[in-house]
Each structure stands twice: as structure tokens, then as C-alpha cells.
Image: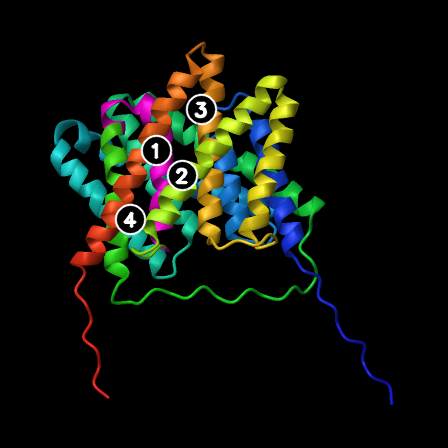
Amino acid sequence: MPTEAPVHRIDPRPRRALRLAFGTAACLGASFGLALPIPFLPPVLTLFLLAMRNQPLSLKAGFALAALAAVTTGGGLLLIPLLRYFPASGVLLVALCLFLSFLQALRGGNPLVTIFLVIGLTLVSATGATDFAIALTVIEALVKGLLLTTLAVILGHWLFPEPAGPAEPPPRPSPDPRRIAWIALRATLVVIPAFLLALIDPGSYVPLVMKSVSLGQQVCATSARDAGRELLGSTLLGGLLAVGFWSALSLLPHLWMFFLWTLLFVLLLARRLYRLSATRQTPGFWLNGAVTLIILLGQSVQDSAAGKDVYTAFAVRMGLFVAVTLYACAAVRLIDRRQPRQPLSSP
């Protein structure tokens, strides 16, 4: 009696790790090669997009995503007059909108839309409160970056396609509906300090705002018990890798070497993100470490091109990253203590 041959499923994780590393490195190289505004933004978006979804992205969907980003981030322009003439009310309104954005994501909304909303509410409105032209530059950078991200994602999926019929990962457990509001509140508190600093000097604190956006996403899935290890550990890891990366790049400073070193470093992190190498940390730990690495490196390259003291600027920026991360840990613990405990149900 004929029997069907067993179906051997291909483990998709190696291809996903290669796709994540190659797509991010290619996007970073193209972004700096084309001298896009805020050149570290496209590879960060590519990193988020490839880590959050394993399905290929069509060119049409990429244009739609860029249009969506323009609309969502453009909403930050509406807050500029309020921040200029009624700053206290403007900050409170931004905080409320951030809270609603994180709340929408925790209730099953699209995390990419949440990222665009948070960037629009913080980066666009803060820069526009100082100079409207800078806010338009941020939106332009985001839209151009998303178009470049789309090409990088398409190229990554073409080179490393998803295996046919891979086993679907188990769905992420949704947070307790009774705790969603508290989680959204602590994510909002994490982002607000960087936003306030950006209101003072938007040009200097753009990397800090992007870091706080990443932390805001991370604290949505981090418990108070693990906050210190998750948030601070991943930030310090990203800083340590950035130092090693810069030392290696200094041996032969060239765009192709920038691409190759990025490919290597992100691949090392991607192997742990997808559990190809044994690790006790969560995927969010490795993703946040990669985001920190790219932001620090991208800004250091810009500092070097502008003739600034790279090492002093890096030390100051890393200190700010650690400070905002420590604040995030404290905010998570504070909100967790303030949260009312649910009484145990009687049998």
C-alpha cells in the first residue's frame, strides 16, 4: 500500500537571519551612499520591518507604506502651533496621543503604524516647534527612507526567500486586558523625556528620540522584573558593539567596508534574535541592541564627516542613551508598583 513521503520542513530561521542582516546592511550602505537626510533612519526602519514580518513586501505595498508614513507623521505638523504658543498644553496633548498610540498597538494594532505615529508625534513636532523646515526634512527623510527600505526588503526576500510552507510561529501572547493601559502609560513615560530634550535642541537629540521610540516599543513587552537586564543590557551591548565596529571600520574607512562590517555585526545579533545560537535573552533584547548599534554608528559617521570630535560626541551620546534607559527602567518599576493588584479569585 503506497504511503506518502513525510514532508520535511525547512527551518526558516537561517534565511531570516541572513535576510535581516543583508537587508539592513544594504539599506545602510545605500542610505549613506545617497547622502539621504538622517541616513541612519532607513536601516533602522528596515531592521524593524524585517524583524516584525516574514512575508515579502511588494513595491505597491511599499509606496502605500510611504504614503501612510507621510500621513501619520504629518499629523505632528498640526501640533507645532500648539507647542509654540501653548507649550504646556502641547506637551500634554503629545503625551495623550502617545498613550493612545501605544494603547492601539497593545490592542492588536499594526506596530509599524505605531512607530510612524510616535515618530510623527515626537520627532516631527519637536523639530517643527523650532523650525518648520526641519520638520519637513524629517518627513522627507522618513518617506525617502521607507522607499529605500522597501527596495532593501524586496532584495532581501529575493536573495533569501521564505521557505515554502514553514511552520508558523506560535502567536505572541497578548497582555492582560486589565494591564494594557498601565503598559501604554509606562511606554509613554519612557518617550516623553527625549521629546522634551528635542524641544530644546532638536538637531542634537534626534538620535535620542529614535532610541526612546525603540525603548518605548520594548517596554511594551518587558516585565518590571526583567526591565534592568532587558533595557540597560541591550543598550550597553549596542554601545560596546559600536565601539568594536568603529575600531574595525577605522582600519579601512570605505563605504563597502561599512556595508560588510554591518552585515557581519547584524548577522551575529540576528543569529541570537532567531535562536540559532543559544541565548537566554529575548528577541527584543537583541533587536534593541541592533537598533542602538545602528543609531550610534550612523551618528558617529555623520560627526566624522562634519569634522566633529567623534569620540567626545560618542561618549556624550552614549551617556544620554544610558541615562534615558535607566529612566525607562525606573519608570517601568514605578508604574508596576503603582498598578493595583488584582485580587485572587476564590475557588
Confirm whether the magenta stretch covers residue 215.
Answer: yes
Disc 2 is placed on an element classified as: helix
**Contact, mark 2 vs mark 4 (Cβ under 8 Å):** no
- Of the residues under marks 4 and 3, which one precedes in the sequence? 4
Q: Is residue 327 left or right of residue 294?
A: left
- Residue at mark 4 to residue at mark 3: CA–CA distance: 25 Å
The N terminus - image quarter: bottom right
Real-space Cα separation, disc 1 to disc 3, in angstroms: 13 Å
Q: Which mark is residue 321?
A: 1
Q: Sequence-wise, which precedes: disc 2 or disc 4?
A: 4
Q: Which three-letter amino acid code belongs to the residue tagged 3?
A: Gln
Please tell me which residue is depicted at 42% across the width and 18% down the height of the picture. Answer: 311
- Nearer mark to the viewer, of 2 and 3: 2
Secondary structure beneath label 3:
helix
Circle 4 residue: 187
Circles 2 and 3: CB distance less than 8 Å?
no
Q: How is the image coloured?
A: rainbow
Which residues, given as a range, are shown in magenta?
Answer: 198-221
Of mark 2 and mark 1, the one earlier in the sequence is: 2
